[in-house]
Image (cartoon, grey):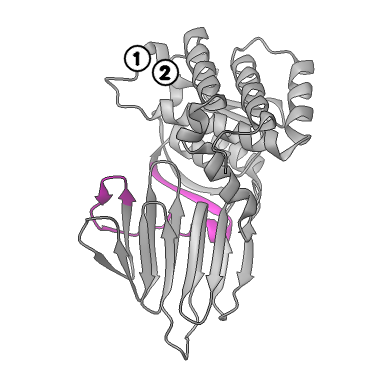
Amino acid sequence: MSQTPSAAQREAIRAAARWYAQLSSGTASDDEQVQWQRWYDSNPLHQQAWQRMQAVSNTLGHLPRQLASSTLLGAGRARRQVLYGLAMLLGGGAFATLGWRSEMRQVWTASHRTSVGERRSFTLADGSRMMLDTDSAVDVHIDEQQRLLVLHRGQLAISTAADPSARPFMVDTRFGRVLALGTRFIVSVDDQGSEVAVQEKAVRVSAGLSQPVHLQAGQRVSVGPTGIGNVRSNDASVGAWQEGSLIAINQRLDTLLAQLSRYRPGLLFCDPAVAALKVSGAFSITDTDLALTALQSAFPLDVHRRSRYWVTVAARD
């Protein structure tokens, strides 16, 4: 099968890059915002391309400080040109090399999916219960030999059912494997890595050449390209999404807003002047506008709503 993206995919990512550069410029008109919304709503390819464009932007925002020059991290024209250039790279022959086409195909064809802002619960063929977080995709393979979930994107929570045949229950991501040992646990994955958090009993986490790690209830671990990280204790934020909340514990504002943005369409910006502000609290993911209002009430912040889909959080005037 050809490894080059279709013409429609290339055009979608190019259009997303153009829109991102324009909407980030600070000069876009209300009419352009309406046009963007129509473009975004008109085709699932546009939505996937926009999400990828946001992922490129987030990646730039997490570069090591010595690499994150003002050219990349500034809010001006240079940064938009870098983003546009990266998007063009993604839209050309390197598109497939960077994995976008493969990832999108997996997401589009996954047996269980959720859209942005959606959370859904499923009962699997073996009786296990699965809950998918926003913008998540997983394939479920249950046969006579095994029970396997392949998480392509997002986050899931599992409560495994007892199995008379003693088939292993596993969750795979591109970074490693989780083997359930009769348990409730959460697995998430994004472009940087995955995380496993155990809520009941235990799991075994394996990744590449790393020594496998056994996690007990109340523990979590991150898994990345270099292997398995250090075991940490769960806190109140773990699994809060299942109850409709994001819980921040002395968390940077830009990090919280990046998490909140996963639950709403459109643009949610954080003014660099307040990005490092530490915040704590519980914020609704079922009503993200309510969450933004709570932030504005509890902290010296203003939420500027140019439209439902174009919001900036900045210092209070």
Q: Which mark is residue 104?
A: none
Of residue 192 and residue 32, the one placed in the foreground of this image is 192
Pointer 2 with pointer 1, Cβ within 8 A = yes
Q: Position of residue 181 (x, y in %)?
A: 36, 77
Instruction: Give the magenta-colored segment's residue range.
Output: 223-250
Residue at the image point whose x is 78% and y is 22% from the top: 35
Residue found at the very far bottom of the displayed protein: 164
Question: Is residue 59 visible in the rendered structure shown here?
Answer: yes
Residue found at the very far front of the displayed protein: 1
Residue at the image point whose x is 71% and y is 40% from the top: 44
Q: Which residue is mark 1?
A: 69
Question: Is residue 75 visible in the rendered structure shown here?
Answer: no
Relative to 7, is 287 above or below?
Answer: below
Badge 1: residue crowd in 10 Å (few <14, some 14–19, many ≥20): few
Q: Position of residue 56 (x, y in %)?
A: 49, 29
Residue at the image point whose x is 40% and y is 11% from the top: 71
Q: Which residue is mark 2?
A: 73
